[in-house]
Image: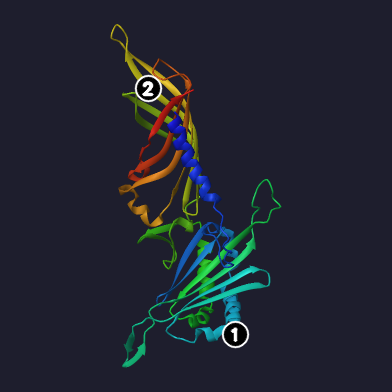
Amino acid sequence: MKKIIFVLALYTGAAISTHAQYSNKIQDPFDVSPENFKRQYFFELGNGNRAEIKLTEISNLDYLKNVDSLLEVVVKDLMPLRDSFADPLASRRIQYMMDAPGLVKIRIQNFPGPASSDYIKSDGVIASLKITQDSLFITGRVRGKPASAFFPLKPAYDYYRICFYLNDINDLAGYMDGRLNEKVARLHDNLDKRWIYKKGKVQTSRDSTITAMANRGRIGGGDLYIVRFSVDAQNYKYRFVPSATISGAIVSSRNLTRREFAIGTEFHFLFSNDIAGKTHSYPNLFITVSYGSTKIDPKAMRSAYASVNLLRYISLAYLVDRKGEFYDKHSFKIGIGRFSLFGGSTRVEPGFYFSN
Protein backbone atom coordinates (compact mmCIF):
# COMPACT_ATOMS: atom_id res chain seq x y z
CA MET A 1 0.00 0.00 0.00
CA LYS A 2 2.78 2.46 0.90
CA LYS A 3 4.63 1.60 -2.28
CA ILE A 4 1.55 2.32 -4.34
CA ILE A 5 1.03 5.70 -2.66
CA PHE A 6 4.71 6.51 -3.20
CA VAL A 7 4.44 5.74 -6.92
CA LEU A 8 1.33 7.88 -7.22
CA ALA A 9 2.91 10.75 -5.30
CA LEU A 10 6.03 10.52 -7.45
CA TYR A 11 3.89 10.58 -10.61
CA THR A 12 1.81 13.60 -9.58
CA GLY A 13 4.75 15.39 -8.01
CA ALA A 14 6.74 15.12 -11.21
CA ALA A 15 3.86 16.60 -13.15
CA ILE A 16 3.50 19.48 -10.70
CA SER A 17 7.19 20.27 -10.64
CA THR A 18 7.29 20.36 -14.43
CA HIS A 19 4.73 23.16 -14.49
CA ALA A 20 6.34 24.99 -11.56
CA GLN A 21 9.70 25.52 -13.21
CA TYR A 22 10.67 29.18 -13.30
CA SER A 23 12.17 30.85 -16.34
CA ASN A 24 13.50 34.39 -16.62
CA LYS A 25 13.40 34.30 -20.42
CA ILE A 26 11.63 37.31 -21.94
CA GLN A 27 8.59 36.33 -23.93
CA ASP A 28 8.99 36.64 -27.68
CA PRO A 29 6.70 39.53 -28.77
CA PHE A 30 5.81 37.57 -31.94
CA ASP A 31 5.01 34.34 -30.11
CA VAL A 32 1.44 33.04 -30.23
CA SER A 33 0.77 29.73 -28.52
CA PRO A 34 -0.40 26.95 -30.89
CA GLU A 35 -3.28 26.40 -28.45
CA ASN A 36 -4.82 29.64 -29.73
CA PHE A 37 -5.52 28.06 -33.11
CA LYS A 38 -8.39 25.58 -33.52
CA ARG A 39 -8.90 25.69 -37.31
CA GLN A 40 -6.42 25.37 -40.15
CA TYR A 41 -6.85 25.52 -43.94
CA PHE A 42 -4.47 25.31 -46.90
CA PHE A 43 -4.71 27.00 -50.32
CA GLU A 44 -2.74 26.03 -53.42
CA LEU A 45 -1.84 29.16 -55.41
CA GLY A 46 0.02 27.57 -58.32
CA ASN A 47 3.71 27.53 -59.33
CA GLY A 48 4.56 25.95 -55.98
CA ASN A 49 3.20 28.90 -54.00
CA ARG A 50 0.68 28.26 -51.24
CA ALA A 51 -1.13 29.94 -48.38
CA GLU A 52 -2.42 28.78 -45.01
CA ILE A 53 -5.07 30.20 -42.67
CA LYS A 54 -5.25 29.53 -38.92
CA LEU A 55 -8.12 30.67 -36.69
CA THR A 56 -9.09 30.58 -33.04
CA GLU A 57 -12.78 30.37 -33.91
CA ILE A 58 -14.44 29.85 -37.27
CA SER A 59 -16.14 33.23 -36.86
CA ASN A 60 -12.67 34.84 -37.17
CA LEU A 61 -12.80 34.01 -40.88
CA ASP A 62 -14.93 37.16 -41.27
CA TYR A 63 -11.79 39.24 -40.68
CA LEU A 64 -10.22 37.71 -43.80
CA LYS A 65 -13.09 38.19 -46.24
CA ASN A 66 -11.14 41.01 -47.88
CA VAL A 67 -7.61 39.63 -47.96
CA ASP A 68 -6.69 42.02 -50.78
CA SER A 69 -7.10 45.04 -48.50
CA LEU A 70 -5.05 43.34 -45.78
CA LEU A 71 -2.24 42.55 -48.23
CA GLU A 72 -2.31 46.10 -49.53
CA VAL A 73 -1.64 47.42 -46.02
CA VAL A 74 1.12 44.86 -45.43
CA VAL A 75 2.87 45.58 -48.74
CA LYS A 76 2.71 49.33 -48.02
CA ASP A 77 4.27 48.84 -44.57
CA LEU A 78 7.05 46.66 -46.01
CA MET A 79 8.00 49.08 -48.78
CA PRO A 80 10.35 51.20 -46.56
CA LEU A 81 12.11 47.94 -45.66
CA ARG A 82 12.57 46.69 -49.23
CA ASP A 83 16.39 46.98 -48.91
CA SER A 84 16.11 43.86 -46.73
CA PHE A 85 15.04 41.96 -49.86
CA ALA A 86 18.06 42.93 -51.95
CA ASP A 87 19.65 39.47 -52.26
CA PRO A 88 17.54 37.55 -54.81
CA LEU A 89 18.90 34.16 -53.68
CA ALA A 90 18.40 34.65 -49.94
CA SER A 91 15.25 33.30 -48.31
CA ARG A 92 13.23 35.48 -45.98
CA ARG A 93 10.93 34.89 -43.07
CA ILE A 94 8.69 37.89 -42.36
CA GLN A 95 6.41 38.18 -39.33
CA TYR A 96 3.81 40.93 -39.41
CA MET A 97 1.74 41.16 -36.23
CA MET A 98 -1.19 43.49 -35.56
CA ASP A 99 -1.18 43.25 -31.79
CA ALA A 100 -3.53 46.16 -31.05
CA PRO A 101 -5.28 48.97 -32.98
CA GLY A 102 -2.57 51.14 -34.54
CA LEU A 103 0.26 48.90 -33.27
CA VAL A 104 2.12 46.76 -35.79
CA LYS A 105 5.26 44.70 -35.14
CA ILE A 106 7.46 43.54 -38.01
CA ARG A 107 10.34 41.08 -37.94
CA ILE A 108 12.42 40.23 -41.02
CA GLN A 109 14.88 37.34 -40.96
CA ASN A 110 17.21 36.80 -43.91
CA PHE A 111 18.83 33.43 -44.52
CA PRO A 112 21.77 33.40 -46.95
CA GLY A 113 21.55 31.43 -50.14
CA PRO A 114 23.03 27.91 -50.41
CA ALA A 115 26.77 27.33 -50.40
CA SER A 116 26.48 25.66 -53.80
CA SER A 117 25.77 27.48 -57.05
CA ASP A 118 22.46 26.41 -58.57
CA TYR A 119 21.21 27.43 -62.00
CA ILE A 120 18.26 26.84 -64.28
CA LYS A 121 18.25 27.01 -68.08
CA SER A 122 15.06 28.04 -69.89
CA ASP A 123 14.77 28.98 -73.57
CA GLY A 124 18.53 29.13 -73.82
CA VAL A 125 18.87 31.55 -70.92
CA ILE A 126 20.75 30.48 -67.77
CA ALA A 127 19.69 32.06 -64.47
CA SER A 128 20.52 31.50 -60.81
CA LEU A 129 18.13 29.14 -59.05
CA LYS A 130 16.66 29.92 -55.62
CA ILE A 131 15.85 26.68 -53.79
CA THR A 132 14.25 27.90 -50.51
CA GLN A 133 10.92 29.73 -50.43
CA ASP A 134 10.15 33.01 -48.68
CA SER A 135 7.52 33.01 -45.96
CA LEU A 136 5.21 35.69 -44.60
CA PHE A 137 3.12 35.31 -41.43
CA ILE A 138 0.38 37.91 -40.88
CA THR A 139 -1.16 37.65 -37.40
CA GLY A 140 -4.11 39.61 -36.05
CA ARG A 141 -5.58 39.73 -32.55
CA VAL A 142 -9.24 40.54 -31.91
CA ARG A 143 -11.46 40.48 -28.87
CA GLY A 144 -13.12 37.10 -28.48
CA LYS A 145 -15.32 35.29 -26.02
CA PRO A 146 -14.86 35.78 -22.23
CA ALA A 147 -11.95 33.75 -20.95
CA SER A 148 -14.01 32.43 -18.03
CA ALA A 149 -17.69 31.89 -17.38
CA PHE A 150 -17.16 32.94 -13.76
CA PHE A 151 -15.28 36.15 -14.60
CA PRO A 152 -16.83 37.32 -17.87
CA LEU A 153 -15.18 40.76 -17.67
CA LYS A 154 -11.73 39.23 -18.01
CA PRO A 155 -10.44 40.09 -21.51
CA ALA A 156 -10.14 37.25 -23.99
CA TYR A 157 -8.65 37.37 -27.45
CA ASP A 158 -8.95 35.41 -30.64
CA TYR A 159 -6.21 35.19 -33.23
CA TYR A 160 -6.17 34.77 -36.97
CA ARG A 161 -3.08 34.12 -39.05
CA ILE A 162 -2.56 33.93 -42.78
CA CYS A 163 0.74 32.46 -43.95
CA PHE A 164 2.25 32.72 -47.44
CA TYR A 165 4.99 30.43 -48.77
CA LEU A 166 6.27 32.02 -51.97
CA ASN A 167 9.13 31.48 -54.38
CA ASP A 168 9.74 35.24 -54.17
CA ILE A 169 8.23 37.60 -51.61
CA ASN A 170 7.90 40.19 -54.37
CA ASP A 171 5.21 37.98 -55.93
CA LEU A 172 2.90 38.92 -53.05
CA ALA A 173 1.53 42.02 -54.77
CA GLY A 174 0.42 39.88 -57.71
CA TYR A 175 -2.14 38.10 -55.53
CA MET A 176 -4.08 41.28 -54.82
CA ASP A 177 -6.31 40.59 -57.82
CA GLY A 178 -9.33 39.10 -56.08
CA ARG A 179 -8.37 35.42 -56.29
CA LEU A 180 -7.63 35.15 -52.55
CA ASN A 181 -10.90 36.86 -51.68
CA GLU A 182 -12.63 34.34 -53.92
CA LYS A 183 -10.95 31.39 -52.20
CA VAL A 184 -11.85 32.66 -48.72
CA ALA A 185 -15.46 33.20 -49.84
CA ARG A 186 -15.54 29.69 -51.31
CA LEU A 187 -14.17 28.26 -48.06
CA HIS A 188 -16.79 30.15 -46.05
CA ASP A 189 -19.61 28.84 -48.27
CA ASN A 190 -18.42 25.23 -48.03
CA LEU A 191 -17.56 24.98 -44.33
CA ASP A 192 -20.69 22.99 -43.46
CA LYS A 193 -20.85 21.04 -46.70
CA ARG A 194 -19.26 17.69 -47.47
CA TRP A 195 -15.47 17.37 -47.29
CA ILE A 196 -13.69 14.65 -49.27
CA TYR A 197 -10.75 12.60 -48.00
CA LYS A 198 -7.95 12.40 -50.56
CA LYS A 199 -4.19 11.83 -50.38
CA GLY A 200 -3.92 12.17 -46.61
CA LYS A 201 -6.00 15.36 -46.39
CA VAL A 202 -9.60 16.46 -46.77
CA GLN A 203 -10.75 18.95 -49.37
CA THR A 204 -13.90 20.86 -50.09
CA SER A 205 -16.19 19.22 -52.61
CA ARG A 206 -16.29 22.41 -54.68
CA ASP A 207 -12.58 23.31 -54.82
CA SER A 208 -9.77 20.76 -54.64
CA THR A 209 -7.19 23.52 -53.99
CA ILE A 210 -8.71 24.20 -50.54
CA THR A 211 -7.66 21.48 -48.12
CA ALA A 212 -7.32 20.73 -44.39
CA MET A 213 -5.80 18.06 -42.16
CA ALA A 214 -9.16 17.18 -40.57
CA ASN A 215 -12.83 17.57 -41.45
CA ARG A 216 -13.87 21.24 -41.75
CA GLY A 217 -10.38 22.31 -40.72
CA ARG A 218 -10.59 21.34 -37.08
CA ILE A 219 -7.27 21.02 -35.28
CA GLY A 220 -7.69 18.05 -32.96
CA GLY A 221 -11.50 17.91 -33.11
CA GLY A 222 -14.07 19.22 -30.60
CA ASP A 223 -16.13 18.07 -27.62
CA LEU A 224 -18.01 14.79 -27.35
CA TYR A 225 -20.38 13.37 -24.74
CA ILE A 226 -20.41 9.61 -25.05
CA VAL A 227 -21.71 6.49 -23.33
CA ARG A 228 -19.30 3.58 -23.53
CA PHE A 229 -19.81 -0.12 -22.88
CA SER A 230 -16.92 -2.56 -22.70
CA VAL A 231 -16.32 -6.19 -21.82
CA ASP A 232 -13.18 -6.63 -19.72
CA ALA A 233 -11.04 -9.36 -18.24
CA GLN A 234 -8.60 -9.13 -15.37
CA ASN A 235 -6.66 -11.13 -12.86
CA TYR A 236 -7.34 -10.83 -9.12
CA LYS A 237 -5.52 -13.07 -6.64
CA TYR A 238 -4.94 -15.69 -9.33
CA ARG A 239 -8.60 -15.63 -10.33
CA PHE A 240 -9.80 -14.88 -13.81
CA VAL A 241 -12.43 -12.15 -13.39
CA PRO A 242 -14.62 -11.23 -16.35
CA SER A 243 -16.28 -7.84 -15.98
CA ALA A 244 -18.44 -5.33 -17.79
CA THR A 245 -18.13 -1.56 -17.67
CA ILE A 246 -20.71 1.09 -18.46
CA SER A 247 -19.50 4.69 -18.33
CA GLY A 248 -20.29 8.18 -19.46
CA ALA A 249 -17.44 10.40 -20.65
CA ILE A 250 -16.76 13.95 -21.70
CA VAL A 251 -14.10 13.96 -24.42
CA SER A 252 -12.47 17.28 -25.24
CA SER A 253 -10.08 17.51 -28.18
CA ARG A 254 -8.16 20.72 -28.43
CA ASN A 255 -4.94 21.62 -30.23
CA LEU A 256 -3.96 18.05 -30.97
CA THR A 257 -4.56 16.92 -27.38
CA ARG A 258 -7.44 14.63 -26.46
CA ARG A 259 -8.66 14.70 -22.83
CA GLU A 260 -11.28 12.38 -21.35
CA PHE A 261 -13.17 12.64 -18.05
CA ALA A 262 -15.32 9.59 -17.26
CA ILE A 263 -17.48 8.14 -14.49
CA GLY A 264 -19.05 4.71 -14.61
CA THR A 265 -19.73 1.34 -13.04
CA GLU A 266 -17.77 -1.89 -13.20
CA PHE A 267 -19.45 -5.24 -12.59
CA HIS A 268 -16.92 -7.91 -11.60
CA PHE A 269 -18.20 -11.49 -11.86
CA LEU A 270 -16.58 -14.13 -9.67
CA PHE A 271 -17.61 -17.78 -9.45
CA SER A 272 -17.35 -20.42 -6.75
CA ASN A 273 -18.69 -23.91 -6.10
CA ASP A 274 -20.57 -24.76 -2.90
CA ILE A 275 -20.31 -28.00 -0.94
CA ALA A 276 -22.76 -29.67 -3.31
CA GLY A 277 -20.65 -28.69 -6.28
CA LYS A 278 -23.13 -26.13 -7.56
CA THR A 279 -21.62 -23.04 -9.15
CA HIS A 280 -22.69 -19.64 -7.86
CA SER A 281 -21.89 -16.23 -9.36
CA TYR A 282 -20.99 -13.23 -7.24
CA PRO A 283 -21.29 -9.86 -9.02
CA ASN A 284 -19.34 -7.13 -7.26
CA LEU A 285 -20.02 -3.51 -8.17
CA PHE A 286 -17.38 -0.77 -8.37
CA ILE A 287 -17.91 2.93 -9.04
CA THR A 288 -15.08 4.33 -11.18
CA VAL A 289 -13.81 7.80 -12.07
CA SER A 290 -10.99 8.32 -14.54
CA TYR A 291 -9.01 10.91 -16.45
CA GLY A 292 -6.79 10.44 -19.47
CA SER A 293 -5.03 12.51 -22.11
CA THR A 294 -3.09 11.78 -25.25
CA LYS A 295 -1.58 13.63 -28.16
CA ILE A 296 -3.28 13.46 -31.53
CA ASP A 297 -1.03 13.05 -34.54
CA PRO A 298 -3.05 13.73 -37.72
CA LYS A 299 -0.34 12.20 -39.91
CA ALA A 300 -0.52 8.93 -37.97
CA MET A 301 -4.31 8.63 -37.90
CA ARG A 302 -4.39 6.44 -41.01
CA SER A 303 -2.03 3.90 -39.40
CA ALA A 304 -3.60 4.09 -35.93
CA TYR A 305 -4.95 0.54 -36.16
CA ALA A 306 -1.43 -0.77 -36.55
CA SER A 307 0.03 1.20 -33.66
CA VAL A 308 0.54 0.70 -29.93
CA ASN A 309 0.23 3.84 -27.82
CA LEU A 310 0.98 4.51 -24.15
CA LEU A 311 -1.64 6.91 -22.80
CA ARG A 312 -1.44 9.18 -19.77
CA TYR A 313 -4.29 7.76 -17.75
CA ILE A 314 -5.37 7.37 -14.13
CA SER A 315 -8.49 5.73 -12.70
CA LEU A 316 -9.88 5.13 -9.22
CA ALA A 317 -12.62 2.61 -8.39
CA TYR A 318 -14.38 1.90 -5.08
CA LEU A 319 -16.30 -1.26 -4.15
CA VAL A 320 -19.88 -0.21 -3.32
CA ASP A 321 -21.64 -3.59 -3.47
CA ARG A 322 -19.66 -6.57 -2.16
CA LYS A 323 -20.80 -10.15 -2.76
CA GLY A 324 -18.91 -13.14 -1.44
CA GLU A 325 -15.61 -13.09 0.38
CA PHE A 326 -13.38 -12.44 -2.60
CA TYR A 327 -12.76 -8.74 -2.16
CA ASP A 328 -11.84 -7.10 1.13
CA LYS A 329 -14.29 -4.62 2.55
CA HIS A 330 -13.76 -1.02 1.42
CA SER A 331 -11.61 -2.15 -1.50
CA PHE A 332 -10.15 0.34 -3.95
CA LYS A 333 -8.63 -0.20 -7.36
CA ILE A 334 -6.24 2.28 -8.94
CA GLY A 335 -4.98 2.19 -12.50
CA ILE A 336 -1.98 4.19 -13.73
CA GLY A 337 -1.15 4.29 -17.41
CA ARG A 338 -2.85 2.52 -20.30
CA PHE A 339 -1.72 0.80 -23.47
CA SER A 340 -3.99 1.35 -26.46
CA LEU A 341 -3.99 -1.27 -29.22
CA PHE A 342 -5.68 -1.45 -32.63
CA GLY A 343 -6.76 2.19 -32.72
CA GLY A 344 -8.17 2.11 -29.18
CA SER A 345 -10.49 -0.87 -29.63
CA THR A 346 -8.39 -2.87 -27.14
CA ARG A 347 -6.81 -1.42 -24.02
CA VAL A 348 -4.48 -2.86 -21.39
CA GLU A 349 -4.28 -1.15 -18.00
CA PRO A 350 -2.08 -2.07 -15.02
CA GLY A 351 -4.23 -2.02 -11.86
CA PHE A 352 -3.61 -2.28 -8.12
CA TYR A 353 -6.07 -3.25 -5.37
CA PHE A 354 -5.91 -2.11 -1.78
CA SER A 355 -8.30 -1.65 1.15
CA ASN A 356 -8.81 0.67 4.14
Q: Quadrant of residue 132?
A: bottom left
Q: Residues within 10 Å of mark 2 (few under 14, many from 20)?
A: some
Query: On residue 160, which mark appears?
Result: none
Could you tell me residue 72's position as x and y percent?
59, 79
Considering every residue shown, the one lying at the far right of the view is: 153
Q: Secondary structure at mark 1?
A: helix
Q: How is the image coloured?
A: rainbow
Horizontal side of 204 relative to 159 (left or right) equals: left
Could you tell me residue 38's position as x and y percent?
52, 57
Could you tell me residue 223's position as x and y percent?
52, 46
Near-viewer residue (21 or 341)? 21
The three-letter code of the residue at mark 2 reads: Phe
Q: Is residue 62 visible?
A: yes
Considering every residue shown, the one lying at the far left of the view is: 277
Q: Is residue 328 above or below residue 258?
A: above
The three-letter code of the residue at mark 1 reads: Pro
Considering every residue shown, the one lying at the far top of the view is: 276
Q: Secondary structure at mark 2?
A: strand
For the residues marked 2 and 1, what is the alpha-carbon distance in whole angstroms?
77 Å
Could you tell me residue 59's position as x and y percent?
59, 59
Near-viewer residue (212 or 251)? 251
Q: Is residue 75 above or below residue 183?
A: below
Residue shown at the point (51%, 50%) measured from the top left? 18
Residue shown at the point (38%, 35%) measured from the top left? 350
Horizontal side of 81 relative to 220 (left or right) equals: right
The residue at which mark 2 appears reads as 269
Q: Earlier in the sequence, mark 2 or mark 1?
A: 1
Foreground: disc 2 or disc 1: 1
Q: Residues within 10 Å of mark 1 (few under 14, many from 20)?
A: few
Q: Is residue 150 above or below residue 108?
A: above
Q: Is residue 291 visible?
A: no
The residue at which mark 1 appears reads as 80
